[in-house]
Image: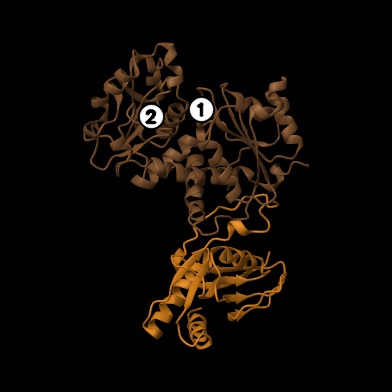
Protein backbone atom coordinates (compact mmCIF):
# COMPACT_ATOMS: atom_id res chain seq x y z
CA UNK A 1 0.00 0.00 0.00
CA UNK A 2 2.79 2.41 0.98
CA UNK A 3 4.69 1.81 -2.28
CA UNK A 4 1.57 2.21 -4.38
CA UNK A 5 0.81 5.55 -2.71
CA UNK A 6 4.37 6.77 -3.20
CA UNK A 7 4.17 5.90 -6.89
CA UNK A 8 0.80 7.62 -7.27
CA UNK A 9 2.22 10.75 -5.57
CA UNK A 10 5.00 10.87 -8.16
CA UNK A 11 2.56 10.26 -10.99
CA UNK A 12 0.34 13.12 -9.80
CA UNK A 13 3.36 15.44 -9.74
CA UNK A 14 4.55 14.23 -13.13
CA UNK A 15 1.18 14.58 -14.83
CA UNK A 16 0.51 18.03 -13.38
CA UNK A 17 4.14 19.22 -13.72
CA UNK A 18 4.39 19.93 -10.01
CA UNK A 19 1.77 20.89 -7.52
CA UNK A 20 0.72 24.34 -8.71
CA UNK A 21 -3.08 24.59 -8.87
CA UNK A 22 -3.58 21.01 -7.69
CA UNK A 23 -5.83 20.00 -4.78
CA UNK A 24 -6.68 16.60 -3.33
CA UNK A 25 -10.23 15.65 -2.39
CA UNK A 26 -10.81 12.37 -0.56
CA UNK A 27 -14.15 10.57 -0.69
CA UNK A 28 -15.33 9.56 2.77
CA UNK A 29 -14.20 7.45 4.52
CA UNK A 30 -11.35 5.46 2.96
CA UNK A 31 -10.53 8.08 0.34
CA UNK A 32 -9.94 10.68 3.03
CA UNK A 33 -7.22 8.57 4.70
CA UNK A 34 -5.59 7.95 1.33
CA UNK A 35 -5.78 11.64 0.33
CA UNK A 36 -4.09 12.62 3.60
CA UNK A 37 -1.30 10.11 2.99
CA UNK A 38 -0.83 11.31 -0.58
CA UNK A 39 -0.71 14.92 0.66
CA UNK A 40 1.96 13.99 3.21
CA UNK A 41 4.09 12.31 0.52
CA UNK A 42 3.69 15.21 -1.87
CA UNK A 43 4.71 17.56 0.92
CA UNK A 44 7.89 15.51 1.45
CA UNK A 45 8.76 15.56 -2.23
CA UNK A 46 7.82 19.14 -3.09
CA UNK A 47 8.21 20.78 0.36
CA UNK A 48 4.83 22.42 -0.20
CA UNK A 49 1.41 21.77 1.26
CA UNK A 50 -1.28 20.68 -1.15
CA UNK A 51 -4.87 21.77 -0.36
CA UNK A 52 -6.88 18.85 1.03
CA UNK A 53 -10.65 18.39 1.15
CA UNK A 54 -13.09 15.75 2.34
CA UNK A 55 -16.20 14.91 0.35
CA UNK A 56 -19.29 13.05 1.54
CA UNK A 57 -21.34 11.80 -1.38
CA UNK A 58 -24.40 10.55 0.50
CA UNK A 59 -26.68 13.34 -0.74
CA UNK A 60 -25.73 12.52 -4.34
CA UNK A 61 -26.24 8.78 -4.26
CA UNK A 62 -28.44 7.34 -6.99
CA UNK A 63 -29.93 4.70 -4.67
CA UNK A 64 -31.26 6.93 -1.88
CA UNK A 65 -34.87 6.21 -2.72
CA UNK A 66 -34.44 2.46 -3.17
CA UNK A 67 -32.12 1.41 -0.36
CA UNK A 68 -33.68 -0.19 2.68
CA UNK A 69 -31.17 1.24 5.13
CA UNK A 70 -30.64 4.96 5.03
CA UNK A 71 -27.00 6.03 4.79
CA UNK A 72 -25.69 8.44 7.38
CA UNK A 73 -24.79 11.92 6.17
CA UNK A 74 -21.31 13.04 7.14
CA UNK A 75 -19.52 16.29 6.68
CA UNK A 76 -18.17 17.66 3.45
CA UNK A 77 -15.21 19.86 4.33
CA UNK A 78 -13.53 21.54 1.41
CA UNK A 79 -11.80 24.60 2.85
CA UNK A 80 -10.89 26.19 -0.50
CA UNK A 81 -12.60 27.28 -3.70
CA UNK A 82 -12.34 24.48 -6.19
CA UNK A 83 -12.98 26.64 -9.25
CA UNK A 84 -10.09 26.62 -11.71
CA UNK A 85 -8.13 24.06 -9.66
CA UNK A 86 -7.00 20.65 -10.87
CA UNK A 87 -8.81 18.36 -8.44
CA UNK A 88 -7.50 14.88 -7.78
CA UNK A 89 -10.40 12.85 -6.44
CA UNK A 90 -9.20 10.01 -4.19
CA UNK A 91 -11.07 6.83 -3.31
CA UNK A 92 -10.08 3.42 -2.00
CA UNK A 93 -11.88 1.02 -4.35
CA UNK A 94 -13.14 1.70 -7.87
CA UNK A 95 -15.96 -0.71 -8.64
CA UNK A 96 -19.19 0.18 -10.48
CA UNK A 97 -18.22 3.84 -10.84
CA UNK A 98 -21.43 5.04 -9.20
CA UNK A 99 -19.66 6.55 -6.22
CA UNK A 100 -17.41 8.51 -8.56
CA UNK A 101 -20.42 9.72 -10.56
CA UNK A 102 -21.94 11.00 -7.29
CA UNK A 103 -18.63 12.60 -6.30
CA UNK A 104 -18.32 14.34 -9.69
CA UNK A 105 -21.81 15.80 -9.29
CA UNK A 106 -21.02 16.81 -5.72
CA UNK A 107 -17.83 18.57 -6.79
CA UNK A 108 -19.51 20.36 -9.68
CA UNK A 109 -22.05 21.81 -7.25
CA UNK A 110 -19.19 23.39 -5.34
CA UNK A 111 -17.64 25.18 -8.30
CA UNK A 112 -16.07 24.69 -11.69
CA UNK A 113 -12.74 22.92 -11.43
CA UNK A 114 -10.28 23.25 -14.31
CA UNK A 115 -9.92 19.49 -14.36
CA UNK A 116 -10.88 16.47 -12.27
CA UNK A 117 -8.56 13.46 -12.09
CA UNK A 118 -9.19 10.20 -10.28
CA UNK A 119 -6.81 8.26 -8.03
CA UNK A 120 -7.80 4.90 -6.54
CA UNK A 121 -5.94 2.37 -4.46
CA UNK A 122 -7.70 -0.61 -6.04
CA UNK A 123 -9.47 -0.98 -9.36
CA UNK A 124 -11.55 -4.13 -9.17
CA UNK A 125 -13.38 -3.82 -12.48
CA UNK A 126 -17.11 -4.35 -13.15
CA UNK A 127 -17.83 -0.76 -14.18
CA UNK A 128 -21.45 0.18 -14.78
CA UNK A 129 -20.63 3.71 -15.93
CA UNK A 130 -18.04 5.04 -18.38
CA UNK A 131 -15.53 6.04 -15.69
CA UNK A 132 -11.78 5.39 -15.61
CA UNK A 133 -9.08 6.19 -13.05
CA UNK A 134 -5.98 8.26 -13.93
CA UNK A 135 -3.93 6.74 -11.12
CA UNK A 136 -4.35 3.17 -9.94
CA UNK A 137 -2.53 1.56 -7.02
CA UNK A 138 -3.32 -1.94 -8.17
CA UNK A 139 -5.77 -3.53 -10.55
CA UNK A 140 -7.26 -6.62 -8.98
CA UNK A 141 -9.46 -8.92 -11.06
CA UNK A 142 -12.45 -9.96 -8.98
CA UNK A 143 -15.70 -11.80 -9.39
CA UNK A 144 -18.82 -9.65 -9.29
CA UNK A 145 -20.09 -11.17 -6.06
CA UNK A 146 -16.78 -10.85 -4.22
CA UNK A 147 -16.25 -8.00 -1.82
CA UNK A 148 -13.07 -5.90 -1.63
CA UNK A 149 -12.28 -4.46 1.78
CA UNK A 150 -9.52 -2.02 2.57
CA UNK A 151 -8.22 -1.76 6.14
CA UNK A 152 -6.48 1.35 7.45
CA UNK A 153 -4.02 2.09 10.24
CA UNK A 154 -6.12 5.18 10.89
CA UNK A 155 -8.93 2.90 12.05
CA UNK A 156 -6.61 0.89 14.29
CA UNK A 157 -6.14 -1.90 11.75
CA UNK A 158 -3.15 -3.16 9.78
CA UNK A 159 -2.99 -1.61 6.31
CA UNK A 160 -4.19 -4.23 3.89
CA UNK A 161 -6.60 -5.05 1.09
CA UNK A 162 -8.72 -8.19 1.33
CA UNK A 163 -10.91 -9.93 -1.16
CA UNK A 164 -13.81 -11.51 0.66
CA UNK A 165 -15.68 -14.32 -1.03
CA UNK A 166 -19.22 -14.66 0.20
CA UNK B 1 -29.36 3.97 10.49
CA UNK B 2 -31.97 6.64 10.04
CA UNK B 3 -34.97 7.50 12.15
CA UNK B 4 -37.20 4.49 12.42
CA UNK B 5 -40.34 6.59 12.33
CA UNK B 6 -42.81 7.89 9.81
CA UNK B 7 -43.49 11.21 11.51
CA UNK B 8 -42.00 13.83 13.77
CA UNK B 9 -44.83 14.87 16.07
CA UNK B 10 -43.36 15.60 19.48
CA UNK B 11 -40.08 15.82 21.32
CA UNK B 12 -41.76 13.74 24.04
CA UNK B 13 -41.66 10.69 21.76
CA UNK B 14 -37.98 11.04 20.79
CA UNK B 15 -35.10 9.35 22.58
CA UNK B 16 -31.90 11.21 23.36
CA UNK B 17 -30.15 9.11 20.69
CA UNK B 18 -32.70 10.10 18.07
CA UNK B 19 -32.24 13.77 18.96
CA UNK B 20 -28.47 13.34 18.66
CA UNK B 21 -28.85 11.70 15.24
CA UNK B 22 -30.93 14.65 14.03
CA UNK B 23 -28.34 17.11 15.40
CA UNK B 24 -25.40 15.27 13.80
CA UNK B 25 -27.17 15.09 10.45
CA UNK B 26 -28.05 18.78 10.66
CA UNK B 27 -24.41 19.59 11.41
CA UNK B 28 -23.32 17.82 8.22
CA UNK B 29 -26.04 19.51 6.18
CA UNK B 30 -25.22 23.00 7.43
CA UNK B 31 -22.37 23.18 4.92
CA UNK B 32 -24.87 23.16 2.03
CA UNK B 33 -26.27 26.51 3.17
CA UNK B 34 -22.82 28.08 2.87
CA UNK B 35 -22.29 27.11 -0.76
CA UNK B 36 -22.72 29.27 -3.83
CA UNK B 37 -25.15 26.68 -5.15
CA UNK B 38 -27.27 25.88 -2.10
CA UNK B 39 -28.84 22.70 -3.39
CA UNK B 40 -28.24 18.97 -3.19
CA UNK B 41 -30.26 16.30 -4.98
CA UNK B 42 -31.10 14.07 -2.00
CA UNK B 43 -34.90 14.51 -2.09
CA UNK B 44 -35.23 14.97 -5.83
CA UNK B 45 -38.73 14.01 -6.96
CA UNK B 46 -40.22 14.13 -3.45
CA UNK B 47 -43.07 16.48 -2.67
CA UNK B 48 -43.36 18.47 0.54
CA UNK B 49 -46.64 20.19 1.40
CA UNK B 50 -46.68 23.06 3.89
CA UNK B 51 -50.10 23.08 5.53
CA UNK B 52 -50.26 26.12 7.81
CA UNK B 53 -53.47 26.98 9.61
CA UNK B 54 -51.83 29.66 11.72
CA UNK B 55 -49.91 32.68 10.51
CA UNK B 56 -46.18 32.09 10.20
CA UNK B 57 -43.50 33.49 8.01
CA UNK B 58 -40.33 32.31 9.67
CA UNK B 59 -41.23 28.66 10.18
CA UNK B 60 -42.99 28.22 6.86
CA UNK B 61 -40.16 29.89 4.94
CA UNK B 62 -37.62 27.80 6.83
CA UNK B 63 -39.39 24.54 5.93
CA UNK B 64 -39.76 25.69 2.34
CA UNK B 65 -36.07 26.56 2.05
CA UNK B 66 -35.06 23.30 3.71
CA UNK B 67 -37.13 21.28 1.24
CA UNK B 68 -35.87 23.25 -1.75
CA UNK B 69 -32.23 22.88 -0.71
CA UNK B 70 -32.79 19.13 -0.79
CA UNK B 71 -34.37 19.47 -4.27
CA UNK B 72 -37.87 18.50 -3.14
CA UNK B 73 -40.88 20.23 -4.68
CA UNK B 74 -42.84 22.40 -2.27
CA UNK B 75 -46.50 23.34 -2.21
CA UNK B 76 -47.82 25.89 0.29
CA UNK B 77 -51.40 25.56 1.50
CA UNK B 78 -52.99 28.22 3.66
CA UNK B 79 -56.54 28.07 5.04
CA UNK B 80 -57.75 31.26 3.39
CA UNK B 81 -57.12 29.85 -0.07
CA UNK B 82 -58.09 26.25 0.62
CA UNK B 83 -61.37 24.36 0.89
CA UNK B 84 -61.21 24.58 4.68
CA UNK B 85 -63.29 27.73 4.38
CA UNK B 86 -65.90 25.59 2.62
CA UNK B 87 -66.15 23.30 5.63
CA UNK B 88 -63.74 20.50 4.73
CA UNK B 89 -62.12 18.77 7.72
CA UNK B 90 -58.38 18.72 8.31
CA UNK B 91 -58.13 15.00 7.63
CA UNK B 92 -60.07 15.26 4.37
CA UNK B 93 -57.88 18.12 3.23
CA UNK B 94 -54.78 16.10 4.06
CA UNK B 95 -56.10 12.96 2.34
CA UNK B 96 -56.60 15.00 -0.80
CA UNK B 97 -53.08 16.30 -0.56
CA UNK B 98 -51.83 12.77 -0.02
CA UNK B 99 -53.78 11.59 -3.05
CA UNK B 100 -51.59 14.00 -5.01
CA UNK B 101 -48.60 11.88 -3.85
CA UNK B 102 -47.20 14.18 -1.17
CA UNK B 103 -44.32 12.54 0.67
CA UNK B 104 -44.08 14.90 3.61
CA UNK B 105 -46.80 17.10 5.12
CA UNK B 106 -45.68 19.93 7.40
CA UNK B 107 -48.57 20.95 9.63
CA UNK B 108 -49.14 23.95 11.83
CA UNK B 109 -52.50 24.04 13.56
CA UNK B 110 -54.07 25.77 16.56
CA UNK B 111 -55.37 22.51 18.06
CA UNK B 112 -53.07 20.44 20.27
CA UNK B 113 -52.71 16.96 18.81
CA UNK B 114 -53.67 18.00 15.27
CA UNK B 115 -50.43 16.62 13.83
CA UNK B 116 -50.84 13.30 15.59
CA UNK B 117 -54.41 13.00 14.40
CA UNK B 118 -53.28 13.71 10.87
CA UNK B 119 -50.35 11.28 11.06
CA UNK B 120 -52.72 8.44 11.90
CA UNK B 121 -54.89 9.23 8.89
CA UNK B 122 -52.32 9.50 6.12
CA UNK B 123 -49.38 7.46 4.90
CA UNK B 124 -47.29 10.55 4.16
CA UNK B 125 -44.73 11.59 6.78
CA UNK B 126 -46.08 14.35 9.00
CA UNK B 127 -43.89 16.99 10.65
CA UNK B 128 -45.46 18.99 13.45
CA UNK B 129 -44.65 22.67 12.93
CA UNK B 130 -46.58 23.67 16.04
CA UNK B 131 -49.89 22.39 17.40
CA UNK B 132 -51.63 24.83 19.72
CA UNK B 133 -50.02 25.05 23.15
CA UNK B 134 -48.73 21.50 22.84
CA UNK B 135 -45.38 21.22 21.05
CA UNK B 136 -43.14 22.85 18.46
CA UNK B 137 -40.51 20.14 18.07
CA UNK B 138 -38.47 21.64 15.24
CA UNK B 139 -38.00 24.87 17.21
CA UNK B 140 -36.67 22.89 20.17
CA UNK B 141 -34.35 20.92 17.89
CA UNK B 142 -32.92 24.04 16.30
CA UNK B 143 -32.50 25.56 19.77
CA UNK B 144 -30.54 22.59 21.12
CA UNK B 145 -28.56 22.52 17.85
CA UNK B 146 -27.63 26.19 18.36
CA UNK B 147 -26.72 25.58 22.01
CA UNK B 148 -24.53 22.62 21.04
CA UNK B 149 -22.90 24.63 18.28
CA UNK B 150 -22.11 27.60 20.54
CA UNK B 151 -21.28 25.72 23.74
CA UNK B 152 -19.94 22.43 22.38
CA UNK B 153 -22.39 20.44 24.49
CA UNK B 154 -25.84 20.50 26.04
CA UNK B 155 -25.41 18.18 29.02
CA UNK B 156 -24.57 19.97 32.24
CA UNK B 157 -25.45 23.46 31.00
CA UNK B 158 -27.74 25.73 32.98
CA UNK B 159 -30.55 26.93 30.71
CA UNK B 160 -33.05 29.55 31.83
CA UNK B 161 -36.35 29.87 29.97
CA UNK B 162 -38.12 33.18 30.57
CA UNK B 163 -41.72 34.03 29.72
CA UNK B 164 -45.19 32.60 29.33
CA UNK B 165 -44.34 28.95 29.97
CA UNK B 166 -47.98 27.92 30.33
CA UNK B 167 -49.02 28.98 26.85
CA UNK B 168 -45.79 28.33 24.98
CA UNK B 169 -45.34 25.26 22.81
CA UNK B 170 -41.73 26.39 22.32
CA UNK B 171 -41.17 26.19 26.07
CA UNK B 172 -42.78 22.75 26.33
CA UNK B 173 -40.71 21.24 23.54
CA UNK B 174 -37.54 22.91 24.79
CA UNK B 175 -37.99 21.67 28.35
CA UNK B 176 -38.38 18.13 27.03
CA UNK B 177 -35.43 18.31 24.64
CA UNK B 178 -33.08 20.00 27.11
CA UNK B 179 -33.82 17.65 29.98
CA UNK B 180 -33.47 14.61 27.70
CA UNK B 181 -30.02 15.82 26.71
CA UNK B 182 -29.01 16.38 30.33
CA UNK B 183 -29.22 20.16 30.72
CA UNK B 184 -30.39 21.78 33.94
CA UNK B 185 -33.49 23.85 33.19
CA UNK B 186 -34.91 26.79 35.12
CA UNK B 187 -38.12 28.50 34.12
CA UNK B 188 -39.08 31.95 35.26
CA UNK B 189 -42.33 33.89 34.80
CA UNK B 190 -45.16 35.52 36.73
CA UNK B 191 -47.19 32.84 38.60
CA UNK B 192 -50.10 33.23 36.15
CA UNK B 193 -47.82 32.01 33.38
CA UNK B 194 -46.43 28.94 35.13
CA UNK B 195 -48.47 25.74 34.65
CA UNK B 196 -49.28 23.48 37.58
CA UNK B 197 -47.00 20.59 38.51
CA UNK B 198 -44.21 21.76 36.23
CA UNK B 199 -41.63 20.35 38.68
CA UNK B 200 -42.51 16.88 37.41
CA UNK B 201 -40.77 17.77 34.16
CA UNK B 202 -37.50 18.08 36.06
CA UNK B 203 -37.27 21.87 35.96
CA UNK B 204 -36.91 24.42 38.72
CA UNK B 205 -39.48 27.23 38.89
CA UNK B 206 -38.51 30.82 39.68
CA UNK B 207 -40.67 33.92 39.88
CA UNK B 208 -37.88 36.50 39.99
CA UNK B 209 -35.77 36.90 36.90
CA UNK B 210 -32.67 38.16 38.74
CA UNK B 211 -32.48 35.05 40.90
CA UNK B 212 -33.00 32.69 38.00
CA UNK B 213 -30.30 34.24 35.83
CA UNK B 214 -27.43 33.71 38.26
CA UNK B 215 -24.87 31.42 36.65
CA UNK B 216 -26.87 30.81 33.47
CA UNK B 217 -25.10 29.45 30.38
CA UNK B 218 -28.08 29.92 28.07
CA UNK B 219 -31.07 32.27 28.34
CA UNK B 220 -34.10 31.54 26.19
CA UNK B 221 -36.49 34.50 26.08
CA UNK B 222 -40.02 33.68 24.99
CA UNK B 223 -42.15 36.13 23.10
CA UNK B 224 -44.82 37.83 25.19
CA UNK B 225 -47.91 36.76 23.28
CA UNK B 226 -49.77 40.04 23.27
CA UNK B 227 -52.80 38.39 21.69
CA UNK B 228 -53.36 36.55 24.97
CA UNK B 229 -53.24 39.61 27.21
CA UNK B 230 -57.02 39.91 27.23
CA UNK B 231 -56.97 36.88 29.49
CA UNK B 232 -55.81 38.91 32.48
CA UNK B 233 -52.49 37.13 32.90
CA UNK B 234 -50.74 40.44 33.51
CA UNK B 235 -51.64 43.83 34.92
CA UNK B 236 -49.91 45.50 31.97
CA UNK B 237 -47.19 45.06 29.41
CA UNK B 238 -45.15 47.77 31.12
CA UNK B 239 -45.24 45.88 34.40
CA UNK B 240 -44.11 42.72 32.66
CA UNK B 241 -41.31 44.61 30.94
CA UNK B 242 -40.18 46.08 34.25
CA UNK B 243 -39.96 42.71 35.93
CA UNK B 244 -39.06 40.31 33.12
CA UNK B 245 -37.29 42.24 30.38
CA UNK B 246 -33.76 40.97 29.74
CA UNK B 247 -31.71 44.15 30.14
CA UNK B 248 -27.93 44.53 29.87
CA UNK B 249 -27.77 44.85 33.69
CA UNK B 250 -29.65 41.60 34.20
CA UNK B 251 -27.59 39.82 31.56
CA UNK B 252 -24.52 40.48 33.72
CA UNK B 253 -25.97 38.10 36.34
CA UNK B 254 -25.52 35.21 33.94
CA UNK B 255 -22.13 33.71 33.09
CA UNK B 256 -19.83 36.04 31.16
CA UNK B 257 -20.07 33.83 28.06
CA UNK B 258 -23.82 33.24 28.30
CA UNK B 259 -25.82 33.22 25.08
CA UNK B 260 -29.26 34.75 24.58
CA UNK B 261 -31.86 33.04 22.41
CA UNK B 262 -35.33 34.00 21.23
CA UNK B 263 -37.65 32.09 18.88
CA UNK B 264 -38.88 35.33 17.31
CA UNK B 265 -40.66 37.53 16.49
CA UNK B 266 -39.04 39.95 18.95
CA UNK B 267 -40.99 42.40 21.08
CA UNK B 268 -38.14 44.83 21.56
CA UNK B 269 -38.36 46.60 24.90
CA UNK B 270 -40.92 44.11 26.25
CA UNK B 271 -39.18 40.81 26.90
CA UNK B 272 -35.78 41.78 25.55
CA UNK B 273 -33.94 45.12 25.54
CA UNK B 274 -32.85 46.19 22.06
CA UNK B 275 -29.22 46.49 23.21
CA UNK B 276 -29.31 42.84 24.37
CA UNK B 277 -31.00 41.61 21.20
CA UNK B 278 -28.26 43.28 19.17
CA UNK B 279 -25.37 42.28 21.45
CA UNK B 280 -22.70 39.68 20.78
CA UNK B 281 -24.40 37.39 23.31
CA UNK B 282 -27.52 37.12 21.16
CA UNK B 283 -27.57 34.16 18.78
CA UNK B 284 -31.08 34.84 17.51
CA UNK B 285 -30.13 34.96 13.85
CA UNK B 286 -27.95 31.87 14.20
CA UNK B 287 -31.11 30.12 15.37
CA UNK B 288 -32.82 31.11 12.14
CA UNK B 289 -29.91 29.87 10.01
CA UNK B 290 -29.73 26.62 11.95
CA UNK B 291 -33.48 26.13 11.62
CA UNK B 292 -33.03 25.42 7.93
CA UNK B 293 -30.29 22.82 8.55
CA UNK B 294 -32.29 21.06 11.26
CA UNK B 295 -35.39 20.89 9.05
CA UNK B 296 -33.30 19.56 6.16
CA UNK B 297 -31.97 16.86 8.46
CA UNK B 298 -35.49 15.90 9.53
CA UNK B 299 -36.81 15.72 6.00
CA UNK B 300 -33.85 13.59 4.95
CA UNK B 301 -34.18 11.27 7.93
CA UNK B 302 -37.95 10.91 7.60
CA UNK B 303 -37.70 10.20 3.91
CA UNK B 304 -35.79 7.24 5.31
CA UNK B 305 -36.00 3.85 3.80
CA UNK B 306 -37.18 3.91 0.25
CA UNK B 307 -39.62 1.10 0.94
CA UNK B 308 -41.65 2.94 3.51
CA UNK B 309 -41.73 6.28 1.76
CA UNK B 310 -42.85 4.89 -1.55
CA UNK B 311 -46.54 5.64 -1.56
CA UNK B 312 -47.49 3.33 -4.38
CA UNK B 313 -46.89 0.17 -2.43
Chain A's colour is: orange
Q: Quadrant of residue B285?
A: top left
B59 w.r.t. A149: above or below: above
Most foreground residue, B60 or B114: B60
Most foreground residue, A9 or B77: B77
- How far across and how far down the image is residue A51, in percent? 43, 73
B77 w.r.t. A141: above or below: above
Q: Which residue is mark 1?
A: B135
Residue B89 in sight here: no
Q: Residue at x 41, y 45 (%)?
A: B286
Q: Quadrant of residue B184?
A: top left
Residue B98 in sight here: yes
B242 w.r.t. B34: above or below: above
Chain coloured brown here:
B
What chain letter is assigned to the residue under label 2? Answer: B
- How far across and how far down the image is residue B98, in percent? 73, 35
Amino acid sequence: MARALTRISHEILERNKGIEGVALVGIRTGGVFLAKRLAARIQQIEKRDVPLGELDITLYRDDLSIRKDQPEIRKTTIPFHISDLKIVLVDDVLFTGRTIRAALDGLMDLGRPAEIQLAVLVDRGHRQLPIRANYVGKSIPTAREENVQVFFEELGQDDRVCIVTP
Amino acid sequence: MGLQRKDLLTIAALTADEIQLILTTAESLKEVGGRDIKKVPALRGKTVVNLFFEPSTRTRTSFELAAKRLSADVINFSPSTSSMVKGETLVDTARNIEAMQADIIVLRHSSPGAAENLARSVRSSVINAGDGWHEHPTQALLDVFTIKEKKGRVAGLLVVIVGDIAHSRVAHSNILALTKLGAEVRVVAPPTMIPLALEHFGVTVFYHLDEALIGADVIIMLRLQRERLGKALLPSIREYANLYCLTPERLKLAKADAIVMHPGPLNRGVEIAPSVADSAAAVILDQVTNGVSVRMALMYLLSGSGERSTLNE
